[in-house]
Each structure stands twice: as C-alpha cells, then as structure tokens.
C-alpha cells in the first residue's frame, strides 16, 4: 500500500467494517447547511444589522443597501399610476354635465352666427341685383356665410362626441397605460426590496463578510447563515460496505464526548465514485483501498449537533437511545 497515501487519509477518517452487517462505523465531522445572502445587483451597503453568532429568524432584516439611480423610483411610479388611473376614470365616466352644457351653448352661438351670415348674404344678393352694392361685397358675404356654417357644423359634431363619451379604443389605450404604469411601479418596488437583504430561513450568522460603506457586487455575500436544524456529515466506506447501503436508510451516530447518547440520521446520498485513490487501481491492494463518500443528514431537535464536532456513524440500522 502507498505509505504517503495512507498518511494523507488516516487523519481524515477511520473506517471499520465487520461481518454480518453489525458494527460498521465511520467517523466524520459535522457540518451545517450554509446560505450566502447577497444582493442581485451592485449597491452600496448602508447598514449591516447582525453580527457573527447572532440567531436570526426568517424575514429578519440583515443588511440595508442603496443605489443612487433607484432613489425616487417608487414615488415616481406611484404618481404615474395615479395619473393613468385618473385618466381612465374620466374616459369611463364620460362627459360631465357642465361640459355638455358648454358644448350645447357653443352650438347655439354658432347657429346664430350662421343664420345671421345667411341673412346678410341674401340681403346683399338682392342689393347686388339692384346695382346698389358691388360684386365684391357679395362674394365677401358668401364666404362669411360659408365659414359660419362650417363652424356651426363643427360645434354640432363636438356636441355629439361629448355626449357619446370616449371611444372603446381610447378606453382600451387608457387601460393599457394603467397596466404599464402599475408594472413599472411593481418593478421599482421589487428593485427597492432587493436592496433590503432579509434572512431566508431561521439560522445563525456564520460570517459577516462586508461592512457599511462598502460597494458590493451582485452575488457577493454580505452575510452567511447556517441552518443548525439540518446538520450533516460525510463519511467514507470501503467497497465491502457500500453495496449494503441505500439512500434513505436510517442510521445512528454518537458524539465522542457523549458516547452514551445516540442521534438518528438518514443516508442522503451515496457517491458512486471512489475518492482518495488512484484513478486506475492496478493492484489488489489498491482495489481494497477504494473509499466511497456517504452523506448522512440528521434532524436534531436537541441542538447538540454543532458544526465542527467529530462524531461516529453506525451504518447498521438501529433506533437511537434517548
């Protein structure tokens, strides 16, 4: 056996395999699931509200960040939504009574002017035939009468449109404007929300990686949380033990300092590839040295399984002793 290889792996683990499926033990070191809490976009850190070792609850604010380009986007979006909604309400409500009355008054005025211009044109026509006025005066009167009639017709059309209210296309365009303003506001709120980093789960602050005043990039951790409710370890077994294990199998473990107490766990995964050995085992001795990783997860309500503690896992299925 390669002596240098033995010196490398012996400090890392110790595996014992006995016949009959009993006493199969392996040692490992406890770890916990770690979660890096980081922003989704570059920003400046305004405040970090936790310290290493603090216990936090899901939803608790960990850090507050700031982006100068996003300041004021939420109030601006709110104003745009209010304006778009007000326009839509006006279109849906139709014309108000004062607007209809004003349009009707405009029609009466234009009607009176058209009638006066028509009478003036008729009077000048008679006078022109009698030779009392020039032909130019008659032409001017005819143009004035035509213009007055056009203004009267325009006032009547405006009154019709006021009474009918907004067209369906205008209402739909206003609705689309409201939807666009609301989407922009939601986007601004989400961007602002991303600048407040909160704890995704209950846990313990393992690392405070940044301080107030620092610029931080997207994806760069500000705080690292550990989930103490989900401790796990990775142990290594040889080729004689691996075929007897299965994912989901119940196992027990004990801490070195508390050998009388056992903890129940389950095999979460089995590594199908050997580790800490040459890629090609050419000799029988090397084949015997093949080791395979086994991940074991625990549900620890007692809180005794701390990250970094060594423990021994019994890979034979047994019920834990209280």
Image: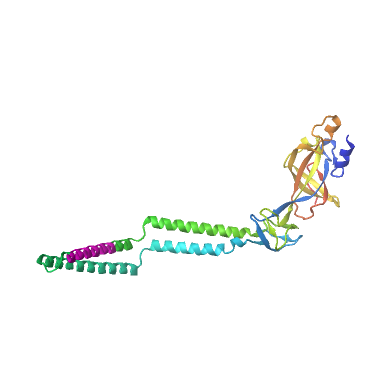
In this rendering, is residue 281 above or below 34?
Answer: above
**Foreground: 118 or 99?**
118
User: Would residue 290 be counted in the magenta stretch?
Assistant: no
Q: Which residues are magenta?
A: 136-156
Q: Is residue 224 left or right of residue 175?
A: right
User: For residue 281, what is the image quadrant?
Assistant: top right
- Residue 116: image location, x then y, percent: 20, 69
User: Residue lying furthest right in this view?
Assistant: 3
Q: Quadrant of the N terminus?
A: top right
Please state if 119 lies on the left or on the right of 18 as rendered.
Answer: left
Residue in view at x 36 percent, y 57 percent: 167
Relative placement, left or right, of 165 versus 260 is left
The quadrant where residue 7 appears: top right
Tell me if I can see residue 59 in this picture. Answer: no
Q: Main secondary structure of the magenta part?
A: helix
Front residue of this view, candidates 99 and 120: 120
Number of labels in the image equals 0
Q: Is residue 150 magenta?
A: yes
Residue 122 is situated, as x and y percent measured from the top left of the image, at 15, 66
Residue 98 visible, this orientation: yes
Q: Please give the name of the residue rendered at 17% of the width and 65% of the height, measured from the top-left corner.
A: 138
Residue 224 on image: x %, y %: 72, 55
Between 56 and 282, the one lying in front of the other is 282
Q: Looking at the rendering, which quadrant does residue 250 occupy?
A: top right
Residue placed farthest to the left in the image? 130
Asked whether, in this view, residue 217 is left or right of residue 109, the answer is right
Percent of width and height locating residue 177: 46, 58
């Amino acid at each position: 056996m390669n002596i240098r290889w033995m010196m490398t792996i012996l400090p890392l683990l110790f595996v014992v395999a006995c016949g009959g499926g009993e006493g199969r033990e392996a040692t490992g070191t406890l770890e916990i699931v770690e979660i890096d809490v980081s922003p989704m976009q570059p920003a400046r850190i305004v405040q970090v509200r936790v310290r290493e070792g603090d216990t936090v609850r899901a939803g608790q604010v960990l850090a507050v960040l700031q982006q100068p380009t996003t300041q004021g986007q939420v109030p601006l979006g709110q104003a745009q939504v209010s304006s778009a909604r007000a326009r839509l309400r006006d279109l849906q409500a139709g014309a108000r009574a004062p607007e209809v009355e004003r349009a009707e008054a405009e029609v009466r005025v234009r009607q009176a002017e058209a009638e006066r211009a028509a009478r003036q044109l008729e009077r000048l026509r008679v006078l022109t035939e009698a030779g009392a006025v020039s032909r130019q005066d008659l032409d001017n009167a005819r143009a004035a009468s035509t213009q007055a009639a056009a203004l009267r017709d325009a006032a009547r059309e405006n009154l019709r449109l006021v009474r009918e209210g907004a067209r369906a296309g205008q209402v739909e365009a206003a609705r689309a404007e409201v939807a666009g303003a609301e989407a922009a506001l939601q986007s601004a709120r989400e961007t602002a929300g991303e600048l407040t980093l909160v704890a995704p789960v209950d846990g313990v602050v393992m690392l405070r990686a940044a301080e107030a005043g620092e610029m931080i990039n997207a994806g760069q951790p500000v705080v690292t949380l550990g989930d103490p409710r989900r401790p796990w370890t990775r142990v290594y077994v040889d080729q004689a033990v691996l075929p007897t294990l299965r994912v989901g199998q119940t196992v027990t473990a004990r801490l070195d300092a508390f050998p009388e107490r056992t903890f129940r766990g389950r095999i979460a995964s089995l590594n199908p590839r050997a580790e800490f050995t040459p890629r090609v085992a050419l000799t029988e001795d090397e084949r015997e040295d093949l080791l395979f990783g086994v991940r074991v997860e625990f549900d620890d309500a007692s809180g005794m399984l701390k990250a970094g503690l060594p423990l021994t896992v019994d890979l034979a299925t047994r019920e834990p002793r209280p």
